[in-house]
Amino acid sequence: MDESSVSEKDRKRREFILNGNPMAVVLNISLPLMALGAFSYISSIIDTVVVSATDNSAVSSVVMISQIKQLISALGAGFATGSSIIVSRLIGRGEYDKAKKAANTTLEVFFGLAVLIIAVIEIFAVGILKLGRLDDDMIAIGIGYFRVQIVSIGIGLFNQVFMGLEKARGAMKNITLINIMSMALKLMFTVVFVNVLHLGTAWVAGGTLCADISVTLYALVNLVRKNYLFKFNPKNVMFSVDFFKPLCSLSIPVSLGKFVFSMGKVIVNGLAVDYGSDAPGALGISNQISGSVTHLTTYSEDSESSIISYNLSQRYYSRMIKVFFCTLTVNLIITTVGFILLTVFSAPISMFFAGDGGAEKAELIEKIFSYERVGIIALGVNSAVNGLIYGLGYTKLSMICNLSRLFAFRIPSMLIMINCFPDMGAESLGIAMLISNVGIGLMSVVIGTVCLIKIKQHKTKDNVRI
């Protein structure tokens, strides 16, 4: 596929990313992704609120199962990042034919992998929940919900990779629109399944599954469209070492880092059970409240990584530095405003999420969140640095950051609080979150400074060759 056969829109996107105003580029790609992050966040709170309103005893099960889902979904997130970096570099160099082959290969592999994951996890569903330290009552309440979520996990893996490729070509407006549609479907099906038909907790996940399927259908329609940049053709699939070596080198550290960090959340939830059956739910809700802000900055790192990858392929070093500071500025504005709003409205938000749990549960949520929210701005800095190191291809460094956040900050601080300050109760969970989030923020400042120095000295290079 030579450049003359590429659509005018795709050529204009490449030109804009490489030569447009850096802040305009960051906002143009970040804002649709942030909207996607907001929809993803809304999806998670819909499950929590609906379950809380219909069966408050199921909240902890749903929250802990959601963490397990994130753990498994880390595989897709890592390879979505890796494939996006590769495709962004190829498009940045104008090598559209190789970009199409890389996209087609990744999509075919993950379609097969999604089917395999669904089959395997369904077989071991109960054992997986036991490993997550759910007790028999929690498993009895949540197993139906988890089995439906397993199918969503498999479909979601494919969707993550597809959206990563769309991000690589800078076409995020389309993804935003399809996600608006999928969120509308999720809300509609959830209300019908749970509130109208009274089908139970499992069907909360059924609404999510319907939404995920709608995104997959959108992807499949595009993949057979004639003028689509990544139009699928079996002849474009390349099972070669030259492709899989850089893909795995970039993706596995991201997947492993996200997997271990998500596993750490499951471990933390397991430790939280020591404070009572409501504690994991309260901690998870605190995470969700914080996520209303940090989800946005997490998605901004995705856009930043693609923009950095484009510009690295052309050795636009000074422009890469500008892109980083534009993203950092956006993240600091979002997290500062978010921190202020969540502080002002902390009490009513906690009461809203407490549902039928009443004032006692709301107080527990607010107590944990009063500490966790302090680290929101630090996580905004962390996201900007993550986008930078992803774009540079330093994915092993990102893995070290995720492992440090878990093993150097979160779990040790939690164990210290549990064993040395047992009288503090569930409040210890919030303190552990604070230490973890601020710790990784400070670590990110050091890492980001080193990376910027390397860029300024032109010691970074485009090492992705297929």
Image (cartoon, grey):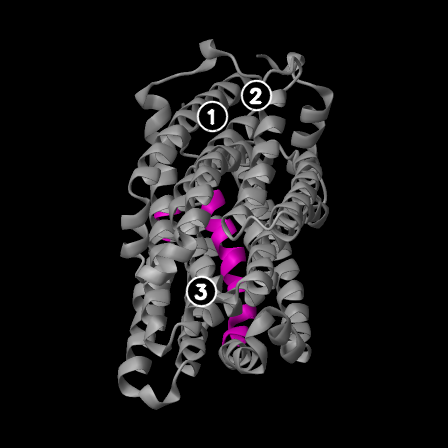
Q: Circle 3 sits in a helix, a strand or a loop, which is it?
A: helix
Instruction: Identify the residue shown where x is 37% and y is 76%.
Output: 276
> Of label 2 and label 1, which has the lower sequence position?
1
Look at label 3 and name its amino acid: Ser
Q: Circle 2 sits in a helix, a strand or a loop, which is it?
A: loop
Q: Nearer the viewer, mark 1 or mark 3?
A: 3
From the top left corner, tell me how far across and down residue 173 is, in percent.
Answer: 70, 37
- Position of the C terminus by quadrant: top left
Instruction: Identify the residue shown where x is 48% and y is 21%.
Output: 104
Up-down relation of residue 433 to residue 334 (above or below): below
Looking at the rendering, which quadrant does residue 215 occupy? top right
The residue indicated by pointer 1 is 107
> Of label 1 and label 3, which has the lower sequence position?
3
The residue indicated by pointer 3 is 60
> Of label 2 and label 3, which has the lower sequence position?
3
The residue indicated by pointer 2 is 230
Label 1 and label 3: CA atoms lie apart by: 35 Å
Q: Which residues are magenta?
A: 372-397
